[in-house]
């Protein structure tokens, strides 16, 4: 619901999803782009929260795997990128 808040981080999810769906840029999961980034709106609203959205985490894991020379390199990149890096690293480990 729009008025419910996530007590963990104080985020109003109704506002968050309305903002995140405003542009096609926020729905870009083209992980094969050489310079792939998370949704700019989701990253701006709450940088520590970015990557918890399943499509974001999966796309980033695929991107890191595709553009890294080894599994170790991909895991190091995931750990250092911020956001929900542990979920991305876990997906890389599968």
Image (cartoon, rainbow, N blue to C red):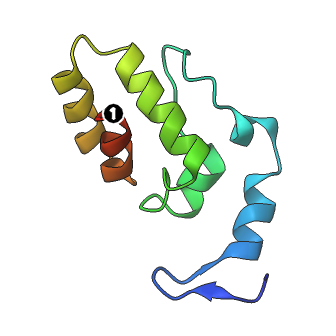
Q: Is residue 12 above or below residue 41?
A: below
Q: Number of callouts in the render? A: 1
Residue 93 drawn at (x, y percent): 28, 35
* Direction from residue 76 to residue 9 in the image, left or right: right
Above or below residue 18? Residue 72 is above
- For the N terminus, the quadrant is bottom right
Asked where in the image residue 68 lies, by quadrant, the reply is top left
Q: Position of residue 90 (x, y in %)?
A: 32, 44
Instruction: Tell me the quadrant of the picture where the C terminus can be found.
Output: top left
**Can residue 5 be seen from the camera position used here?**
yes
Residue plotted at (70% across, 67% down): 16
Classify mark 1: residues with Cα within 10 Å, few (<14), some (14-19) or many (20+): many
Residue 17, compared with residue 89, is above or below; it is: below
In this rendering, would 33 be left or right of 4? left
Q: Quadrant of residue 29?
A: top right
Residue under circle 1? 92
Horizontally, residue 73 falls left or right of residue 30, namely left
- Residue 81 visible in the snapshot: no
Image location (x, y in percent) of residue 24: 80, 36
> In the figure, 77 relative to 48: above or below?
above
Residue at the far top in the pictured view: 69
In the rendered image, residue 82, in percent from the top left (x then y), is placed at 33, 49
For the point 56% across and 16% down, which residue is it?
33
The residue located at (60%, 42%) in the rendering is: 55
As rendered, which of 54 and 10 lies closer to the eye?
54
Q: Secondary structure at mark 1?
A: helix
């Amino acid at each position: 619901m729009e008025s419910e808040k996530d007590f963990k981080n104080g985020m109003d999810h109704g506002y968050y999803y309305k903002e995140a769906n405003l542009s096609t840029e926020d729905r870009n999961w083209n992980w094969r782009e050489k310079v792939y980034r998370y949704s700019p709106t989701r990253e701006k609203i709450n940088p520590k929260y970015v990557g918890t959205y399943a499509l974001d985490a999966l796309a980033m894991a695929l991107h890191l795997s595709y553009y890294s020379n080894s599994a170790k390199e991909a895991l190091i990149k995931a750990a250092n990128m911020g956001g929900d890096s542990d979920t991305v690293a876990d997906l890389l480990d599968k």
